[in-house]
């Protein structure tokens, strides 16, 4: 995640990096949340809302505060089960990861709607960095790990290349004032059909506020 403020923020920029995880075995946080959901989504949701007031005050027309959520193409396979966000009924590490990344896109669009409706100088976008050769793939099973190594050298992006889309959304002049977009390879791309479901966006927002102990806006 990247949050950028302008004007009144020290040095003009805030970088907030939150760790992510992928394909880990089933486990829970100390609060009882499924690990992918908590680390990839709910923590981002709480952090963003905790800083939202200062981002609203910091932005201005022509230099808006920017929030960039890092999703994944895996979100296209995601399903958000509002009755079982912690996936206790049927656990799949791939399904849990896909749900967390879809949740980020739903959150992105709903928050942008709020910022637009309130007239706040804040934009919110989601980005897909592509397949990047990082430690995220360390949780693949051993055969997949062995197959991944030679493939990664030719098909995967380097960490610097993977970060380029996030940096583009965060600082590019052509992204000024542009919000509610899913960006891949520097291009605005259509995300999963489910991510545009406004009722699901609102339902997830309400439930996330409840889980994070926040008052719903």
Image (cartoon, rainbow, N blue to C red):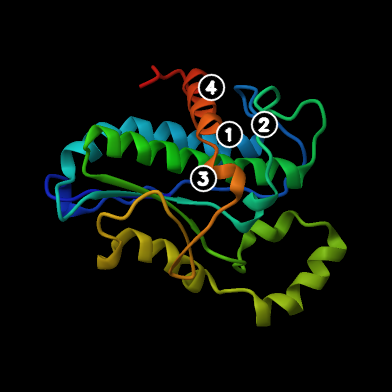
Is there CB contact under 8 Å for labels 1 and 2?
Answer: yes
Specify which label sits upstream in the sequence, 3 or 1: 1
Quadrant including the C terminus: top left
Left or right of 181 in this view: 66: left
Residue 86 position by quadrant:
top right
Specify which label sits upstream in the sequence, 3 or 2: 2
- What residue did someone put label 1 on? 38
Crowding at mark 3 (Cα within 10 Å: few <14, some 14-19, many 20+): many
Q: Is residue 24 above or below residue 178?
A: above
Specify which label sits upstream in the sequence, 4 or 3: 3
Give the Cα distance between marks 4 and 1: 13 Å
Crowding at mark 2 (Cα within 10 Å: few <14, some 14-19, many 20+): many
Residue nearest the viewer, comparing 70 with 191: 191
Q: Secondary structure at mark 1?
A: helix
Crowding at mark 1 (Cα within 10 Å: few <14, some 14-19, many 20+): many
Specify which label sits upstream in the sequence, 4 or 2: 2
Q: Is residue 190 above or below residue 7?
A: below
| Residue farthest along the right direction in this orientation | 143
- What residue did someone put label 3 on? 105
Residue at the spot 54% in from the left edge and 52% down from the top edge: 71
Give the Cα distance between marks 4 and 3: 15 Å
- What residue did someone put label 4 on? 207
Give the Cα distance between marks 4 and 2: 15 Å
Give the Cα distance between marks 1 and 2: 6 Å
Left or right of 108 in this view: 7: left
Give the Cα distance between marks 3 and 1: 15 Å
Residue at the spot 54% in from the left edge and 38% down from the top edge: 41
User: Residue 91 bears which disc, if any?
Assistant: none
Which is more foreground, mark 3 or mark 2? 3
User: Residue 34 bears which disc, if any?
Assistant: 2
């Amino acid at each position: 995640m990247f949050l950028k403020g302008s004007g009144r923020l020290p040095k003009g920029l805030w970088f907030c990096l939150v760790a992510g995880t992928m394909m880990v075995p089933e486990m829970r946080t100390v609060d009882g949340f499924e690990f992918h959901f908590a680390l990839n989504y709910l923590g981002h949701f709480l952090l963003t809302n905790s800083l939202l007031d200062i981002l609203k005050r910091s932005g201005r027309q022509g230099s808006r505060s920017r929030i960039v959520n890092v999703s994944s193409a895996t979100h296209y396979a995601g399903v958000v089960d509002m009755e079982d966000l912690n996936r206790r009924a049927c656990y799949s590490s791939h399904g849990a990861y896909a749900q967390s990344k879809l949740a980020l896109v739903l959150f992105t669009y709903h928050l942008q709607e709020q910022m637009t409706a309130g007239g706040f100088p804040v934009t919110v976008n989601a980005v897909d960095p592509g397949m990047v050769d990082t430690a995220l793939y360390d949780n693949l099973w051993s055969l997949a790990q062995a197959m991944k190594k030679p493939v990664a050298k030719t098909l995967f992006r380097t960490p610097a290349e993977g970060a380029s889309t996030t940096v583009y959304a965060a600082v590019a002049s052509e992204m000024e004032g542009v919000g509610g977009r899913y960006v891949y390879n520097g291009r605005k791309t259509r995300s999963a059909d489910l991510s545009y479901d406004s009722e699901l966006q609102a339902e997830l927002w309400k439930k996330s506020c409840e889980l994070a102990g926040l008052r719903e806006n």
